[in-house]
Amino acid sequence: MKTKYDVRTVARQFQIYGEFRSAEPYGSGHINDTYCVVFDQAGTCVRYIFQRINHLVFKNPVALMENIARVTLHLGVQSAGAGDASRRSLTLVCARDGRPFHQDADGSHWRVYLFIEQARTYDAVESPAQAFEAAKAFGLFQKMLANLPAPRLHDTIPDFHHTPKRFLALEKAVAADAFNRAVLAKPEIEFALRHQSITSILLEANLPERVTHNDTKFNNVMLDDETGRGICVIDLDTVMPGLALYDFGDMVRTTTSPVKEDERDLSKVTMQFPMFEGLVRGYLSSAGGFLTKDEKRLLAFSGKLITFEIGLRFLTDFLAGDTYFKVHRDGHNLDRCRTQFKLVESIASHEDAMNELVASVVSSAEPVAELVEELR
């Protein structure tokens, strides 16, 4: 199959030995170009993940790769000695010049990871047990990076989860209306305006800065094929300083709704409480020991805020001409926005019960193993 880029030539620049066999597009990400590349190494087919970093989104690929190199090395050291240690964190393959990336003749930056076998991602959660495992993996990811040595990581996208600035960007896009699309999104713009008051709540809560993933979609954690356990957190482009609740909030956004984020039938969009319970129990089982009282108190709210924020981003991109997220049909980003805003409404309708659950789990002394069996 012909690929968009000359992956075979790129592959020669990395410390990979054997005969290049094939390269196929891989995954469902919106931002980077990803390929599964197969090499014949002494008669055995070995797979790698190649990614071309989208420099239009990530303006400083070198700083981004410095972050990823530091984080993956630290996670590898933290996992050393554990069973399946090589599958518990991403492993970078260096370029032949020793750097963790290669810049090709066109100026594109490429990176390569070892392929993690016998595990996969899911675009949609299938059970509360899966929600538990994903949240536990993301919580452990935060916990393992809590002692990452200085210096502070680079901000790969400054103010990535700064919701008030995201709202300001929407206001500017509405005012400019560069593609005459505001009329098509009038209800969504009005919804956004009605909810402006929630945008600064997390930033004003005086929460501690942590090393966070910042893009904790359910399909950014790999689940082991045999055990179903959360095995590895992937897609580290946005790993940088942030609030722990950014991560938990995005878990709620991407895991509690039974449909994909671009579902057109909004009657199908709803916050599934059993999935939320799985997330809370899984996340607190690994992260509960280092979270502050205020971080725990705002867990449920974070889901509503981050869902609203991502809706703002989809709406802004729609109004600005679809320059950030990849789109596959007319109005794709507007469809995505609508699902987010519908989910905000559903979360708000369950918010009291969500807060009660969090308080119950925080005060509970139930063994984690028993919680997992209940969810299964």
Image (spheres, helix red, strand yellow):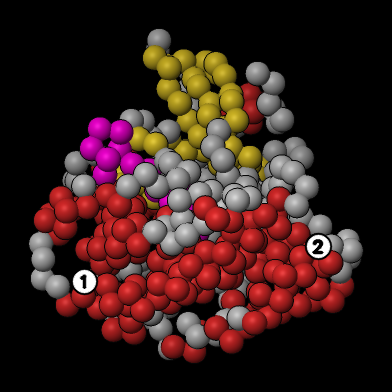
Residue 243 forms part of the magenta stretch: no
Residue 217 forms part of the magenta stretch: yes
Residue 49, position in %: x, y? 50, 34
Question: Relative to residue 177, is residue 247 drawn left or right?
Answer: left
**Residue behind mark 1:** 361
Question: Relative to residue 236, is residue 149 drawn left or right?
Answer: left
* Depicted 296 relative to depicted 50: above or below: below
Which quadrant of the figure contains the N terminus? top right
**Residue behind mark 2:** 184
Badge 2 amino acid: Leu
What residue do we see at 34% from left, 57% from top? 275
Q: What element carries label 1?
A: helix
Where are the magenta residues, as a range? 215-229
Question: Relative to residue 221, is residue 166 drawn left or right?
Answer: right
Residue 354 is drawn in which quadrant?
A: bottom left
What residue do we see at 56% from left, 53% from top? 261
Residue 359, position in %: x, y? 25, 78
Residue 99, position in %: x, y? 54, 45
